[in-house]
Image (spheres, rainbow, N blue to C red):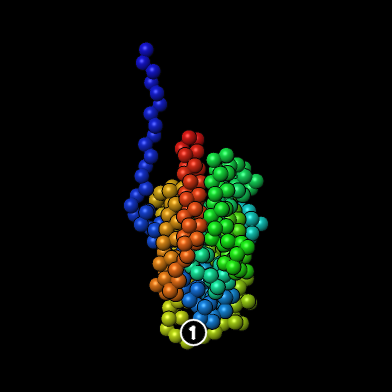
Amino acid sequence: MILQTKSPIAEIPMPPVAIGIALFSFFCFSLLDASAKWLVVGGQAVFFVVWVRFAIQALFLLLFFKGWENPKLWKMERPVLQVCRGLLLPAMTCFNFLALQYLQLAETISVLLASPIVVAVLAGPMLGEWAGPRRWVAIFVGFIGVLIVVRPGTDVFSWPVLLIIGSMLCNSFYLVLTRKLASVETPESLIFYSCFFGVLIFAPLGIPEAQMPQQMSDWFAFALAGMAGMVGHMGLIKASKLADAAKVTPFIYTQIIWMTLLGFLIFGDLPDGWTVLGMMVVAGSGLYLWYREHKLRKRA
């Protein structure tokens, strides 16, 4: 008797165009941080830079989605969680821009890329997605990577490190709430409200501190900060439509390359050996967590 076994379903490879869009999107996020650092180091008020970043994106989204006639942009099924999520991205951005006044681009991204590791911890109590033993080992290794970068108890550790850790934690909760709301809220509202609340919160804080840019480079940096964030988010939406979102996620670690390169070319910064080692540990841990999640989803 011949036993027939169930043949595995061939996995559809990620289209090259989706790969290109994902790579470009994370490059845009790196440009956003580099532009913000240029502005705040040059004397622009952090709150004003944050407000401009969200105002440009919110205005474009209103025009792109025709917000005056598109109810999907304003619809809320879970208003409390939508508001909480809408507050987290502006908070994450503010902490990040404040830290960029003092830290290298490579240092900030090394800590921010620990967000997927924290998400794996939060996914248990908040989403019911409990990590197994292997993923807990990866989480532990990832936190060791962060400790290598920030090195508490040494001269390298300073109070701005607490700002970037705060930014990373805000981003982690933002990602968890995004996953929780993705099945009940429209994509248009998810991307719009995070900008909308940023505009509302930072208008009274940032506009009174506004300074007219004195150089063309500052005008360019303001425009780039707003456009890069917008294009990056829109690109991720497009890439996730062309391919499974889980396949897009690993490309986030290309920001390590972009941020290090931009930090050197624009600001003359080079990370030290310990920071590079910490980057590699954090990235390796995050990629393993993605791999384990990917394998578990395939089994399911």
* In-front residue for pair 63/247: 247
* In-front residue for pair 140/242: 140
> Up-down: is 139 above or below 207?
above
* In-front residue for pair 170/204: 170
Residue at 50% over, 43% down: 293
> Up-down: is 122 above or below 200?
above
Q: Which residue is mark 1?
A: 213
Please rate how many residues cluster around mark 1, counting C-alpha atoms within 10 Å: few if below 14, some from 14 to 19, many from 20. Answer: some
Q: The N terminus is located in which quarter?
A: top left
- Which quadrant of the view contains residue 133? top right
- Which quadrant of the view contains residue 201? bottom right
> Up-down: is 16 above or below 86?
above
Locate residue 263, reporting x and y percent. Answer: 44, 70
* In-front residue for pair 165/159: 159
Using the rendered image of the protein, determine whether residue 254 is visible from the camera's viewpoint. Answer: yes
- Residue furthest toward the front? 154
Locate residue 248, reporting x and y percent. Answer: 43, 52
- Residue furthest toward the left? 16
Residue at 38% over, 21% down: 4
- Left or right: residue 193 versus residue 218 is right
> Up-down: is 165 above or below 205?
above
Residue at 50% over, 73% down: 36
Locate residue 54, reporting x and y percent. Answer: 53, 70
- Residue furthest toward the bottom? 214
Using the rendered image of the protein, determine whether residue 196 is visible from the camera's viewpoint. Answer: no
Residue at 54% over, 60% down: 149
Label 1 element class: loop
- Left or right: residue 93 versus residue 80 is left
Three-letter amino acid code of the residue under disc 1 = Pro
Locate residue 9, reporting x and y percent. Answer: 39, 34
